[in-house]
Image (cartoon, rainbow, N blue to C red):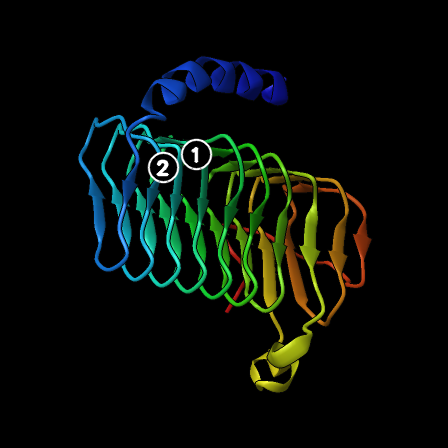
Amino acid sequence: MRRHLLALALALTLPVMAQAADNDIDKVNGTVHVDAGQHVGNVSTVNGAVRVGDNAVVQKASTVNGAVELGDHVQAAAVDTVNGGVTIGSSARVAGTVSTTNGGVHLGKGTDVAGKVSTTNGSINLDAAHVGGGVKTTSGDIIVGANSHVEGGILMDKPGGWFSISGNSNRIPHVVIGPHAVVQGTLEFRRDVVLQVSDSAQIGAVKGATPVKFSGDQPAG
């Protein structure tokens, strides 16, 4: 049922986003601002942040060296950065993926991401949010907060390349599935993790880790 409602919401969103596609904002150096309620196309910079105000509509929001911040009720086609975090406010809609390499991802209450949420070196935090394409990281913690819903499972990949010799790979990530959260699909861990699951959460099959149950709002300690 949730998937059908999300598909309907995205179907209603796409025509609005298509109208914004002809009004791109591109920079090389400096922060890009999209005002609240503004409708634009692709929003990008190389060295700087991307900040999108509440109720705005954008296509792809991207940067290389900087953060991407979307306000409440924002509609976007996709979000990505390389060196920077991604923060999305409440009740926002992303039709595609949300990704970063070196930075964390935070999704606010009621936010829907239809695609995958991924990072390599950073945490992922869902606050009563929905992700339709799974969650993936290599080194960061994953917090699937209370009342969040993840379809497509969770993948904690094994560090490789430069990352495996940088020293960051020695830290054991923590994965927490909060009260009344739902993770559909396999939770696969290709490296050591601490996996803590609320006794009111629902999860799929687990590979590579042993779940530790907890009660209350969050794990002790």
Binning the other alpha carbons within 10 Å of mark 2 as few (below 14), some (14 to 19) or many (20 upward) gives many
Residue at horizontal 77%, vertical 63%?
209
Residue 47 pos. (x, y %): 30, 62
The residue labelled by disc 1 is 111
107 sits left or right of 134 in the view: left
Q: Nearer the viewer, residue 190 or 116?
A: 116
- Point out the tag, 2 or 1, that comes first from the N-terminus: 2
**How far apart are labels 2 and 1 at the CA level?**
20 Å
Q: Secondary structure at mark 1?
A: loop
In the shown orientation, is residue 164 left or right of residue 23?
right
Label ID, residue 42: 2
**Circle 1: residue type:** Thr
On screen, residue 86 versus residue 123, left or right, reads left
Q: Quadrant of the N terminus?
A: top right
Residue at 79% x, 53% y: name it.
206
Labelled disc at residue 63: none
Placement of 6 over or under 120, stated as above or below: above
Give me the residue at 36% from left, 26% from top: 21
* Mark whose residue sits in front, 2 or 1: 2
Name the side, left or right, on which 44 lies relative to 198: left
**Which residue is situated farthest in the left direction here?**
35
Quarter of the image for residue 108 reads: top left
Q: Residue at x 54, y 21 (%)?
A: 6
Give percent across and percent down for residue 11: 51, 15
SS of the residue at dot 2? loop
Please state which of residues 135 and 29 is positioned toward the viewer in this rendering: 29
Three-letter amino acid code at disc 2?
Asn
